Image (cartoon, grey):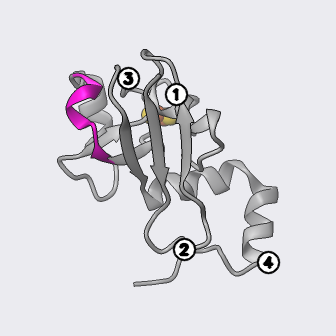
Amino acid sequence: MPKVTFHPPKWATTEPVRVADVPAGTNLLEAAHACDAKEGSACGGVCTCSTCHVWVKKGLASLGEQEDRELDILDRAFEVKPTSRLGCQAIVSDADVEVEITEESISAWYDEHPVERHEAEARGEWPPPKG
Ligand code: FES
């Protein structure tokens, strides 16, 4: 089974790297859920929000083509790069994939998980440093 590795944003030094072994055909957002990676999903994975935005560090070509709808939604995302994908639209094939979770995405995850956000604030791990 391919391995999907989720790196936290660079400033999130206390957040662990998380890894999921998933069957081919799984999307990156489903893989994030499988290993408790903090990838946001405000629209529930129906390609209307961009909160599942990640940067692919390894395995980009194996994720298949982007549909017009994904590109349209990425137009509204922050810090879009050539390696940007929406987790809910990027399907894992047989190859391993590594991604970095964007600040946009982890921020959305904390919005969706207020208890964990409160705990992270108490530990000084949230919000991210400015600049
Ligand atoms: S979860 Fe909303 S676009 Fe992917």
Most foreground residue, 92 or 104: 92
- Say which mark, if any, is on residue 122: 4
Tag 2 residue: 13
Q: Is mark 1 within 8 Å of ligand 1?
A: yes
Indicate the amino acid at tag 4. Ala
Which of label 2 and label 4 is nearer to you?
A: 2
Location of the C terminus by quadrant is bottom left
**Up-down: is 80 above or below 122?**
above
| Of pointers 3 and 2, the one earlier in the residue sequence | 2
| Of pointers 2 and 1, the one earlier in the residue sequence | 2
Tag 3–tag 4 contact (CB < 8 Å):
no
Tag 1–tag 4 contact (CB < 8 Å):
no
Tag 3 residue: 91
Question: Residue 73 location in percent, x, y?
Answer: 32, 36
Q: Residue at x 46, y 83 (%)?
A: 130
Give the alpha-carbon distance from disc 3 to disc 4, as whole Å: 36 Å
Label 3 sits on a secondary structure element that is loop
| Of pointers 3 and 4, the one earlier in the residue sequence | 3
Indicate the amino acid at tag 3. Ile
Give the alpha-carbon distance from disc 2 to disc 4, as whole Å: 16 Å
Question: Residue 44 location in percent, x, y?
Answer: 58, 29
- Would you say 106 lies left or right of 64 here? right
